[in-house]
Amino acid sequence: MAYRFGKRHEQSLLPASIEDYVPAEAPVRVYDAFVEALDFNELGIELDSRKVGNSSYDPKAMLKLLIYGYSYGARSSRKLERETHYNLSFMWLTGGLKPDHKTIAQFRRKHKKALSKVLKQCARLCLKLDLIVGNSLFVDGSKMRADASLKHHWSKDRCRKRLEKIDRRIEEILSDCERTDAQESSDGSMVEMHEELTDQQALRSKVQETLKQLESESKASVNTTDPDCVRIHGRQGSHAGYNLQTVVDEEHGLIVHADVVAANNDRRQLVSQVNQAHETLGRSCETVCADAGYSNYNQLEELDSQDVGVIVPSPRQASTKAVEPFDKSEFKYDSDSDVYVCPAGEVLTYRGIENKNKKAYRVGGRVCRQCSYFGECTKSRKYGRKIVRYVNEEFRERLQSQFEQPDCQAIYELRKQKVELPFGHIKRNLHAGYFLLRGLAGVRAEASLLASCFNLARLITLVGVPALIAELSK
């Protein structure tokens, strides 16, 4: 069998242009058309080619480079610089421009606020194409590593312990200096001692500043590398990180809104994320669905007051553990008399409010001690069994009953399919399980780019490259 050999050094009479190397159906053309369709005034990026002074790179080309680079898995400024030299699609996209990594990093750092607005325009494009309906929204969060280490994460207790250790070491160094000076011995190095003393004193000042910051801001802990990040507890252990929140549409799983919060859980995020998604949609959705991590009934009541249907299981409904004997559900509530009746037929009466939102009901220790279930139902000899009823218990029961309905169960099952897909694409396909930028402004800019890349990949699958370019060019 004969072989076909390439001829690397063969010259052509008329060199081909970069345009000839990029097919008409190449996905990179979608990213080019998408950036051209963006409203740069709304983003807050000034476009003025007539400005005097030294020339700068075209902001559109720089934004194209960032968005396509993120979709390609190349996020660092040095990788993006390399792609502009060796990757034909990047060469075509930038028109042959080759900004260095410092220029790329500076553009990204300077336009964090603008980059965080890209997703909103991307979502509105999906609305224009009728690919986002906005009737049912699915909310979920995922932990992302920050560009910081837990070694630089300080609590008040750690600061105080480190200060004690530093003070002891400073005393030891000063004692060694005095002893060496008195003996005039050549064994010890006064230069090294003074250097270490200076280092310890500098470290002491930094730790003291951190402790003052914690006390003044009433924070439990702070990271000196990235002050905005928090200590995240996830499946991969504890690390410095952020909580990436996404709101996904039911129809095609496209992201309506993405945000990053400095919180270790999702309990207080539902209302904020849904309201920002409503702002993008221009109206309120009909139903919001989330997992038990969002089961904060103050938040759920606020959404319910906005006439938004809520499908969120309680922690008990989400748990796989069997219900224990003599659980609260085994006690019957009489709303007319405002009492509970236990399985043995005894009446638990109202005894007062606890923590402003809990009503306590008890039967008394004497009655419980005489009961055959004593020791199983309760072990409190003095007070007997207590049942806690929340002030908004009726609302809680309604939501729990609503969640068990077949139509709500179907929506909840669909949520699992739609809401996990973006996280899988971002973390696996785009290799973005961590943020490169520091601070909430930086990570929110990255989240917007990553979410936009997911939406564009879905649009290419749903619409196709030629049809999508035609829509973007209108």
Image: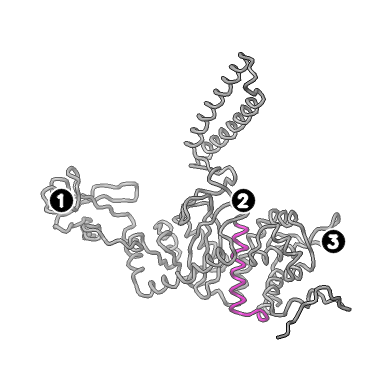
In this picture, is 185 found above or below 58? above
Q: How crowded is mark 2: few (under 14 residues within 10 Å), some or many (20 or more)?
A: some
**Residue 405 placed where, x, y %?**
34, 72
Q: Which of marks 3 and 1 is in front?
A: 1
Q: What stretch is highlighted in magenta?
A: 444-467
Quarter of the figure that contains the N terminus: bottom right
Badge 1 marks a residue whose secondary structure is loop
Q: Which of marks 3 and 1 is nearer the N terminus?
A: 3
Residue type of the residue flagged with mark 3: Arg
Residue at left offset 31%, top offset 51%? 358
Q: What element carries label 2?
A: loop
* Residue marked by disc 1: 374
User: Residue type at mark 1?
Assistant: Phe
Residue position for label 3: 50
Against 307, residue 445 (above or below) is: above
User: Which of pointers 2 and 1 lies earlier in the amino acid sequence?
Assistant: 1
Name the outermost residue toward the right: 13
- From the image, tell me which residue sits under label 2: 438
Q: Which residue is drawn at 62% across and 69% down?
A: 122
Dot 3 falls on a residue whose secondary structure is loop
- Where residue 306 appears, as percent x and y from the top left, is 45, 64
Q: Residue at the spot x=13%, y=49% of the render?
A: 367
Residue density around tag 1, few if under 14, some if 14–19, many if 20 or more, within 10 Å: some
Q: Is residue 344 left or right of residue 437?
A: left
Judge whether residue 449 is colored magenta: yes
Closer-to-camera residue (442/164): 164
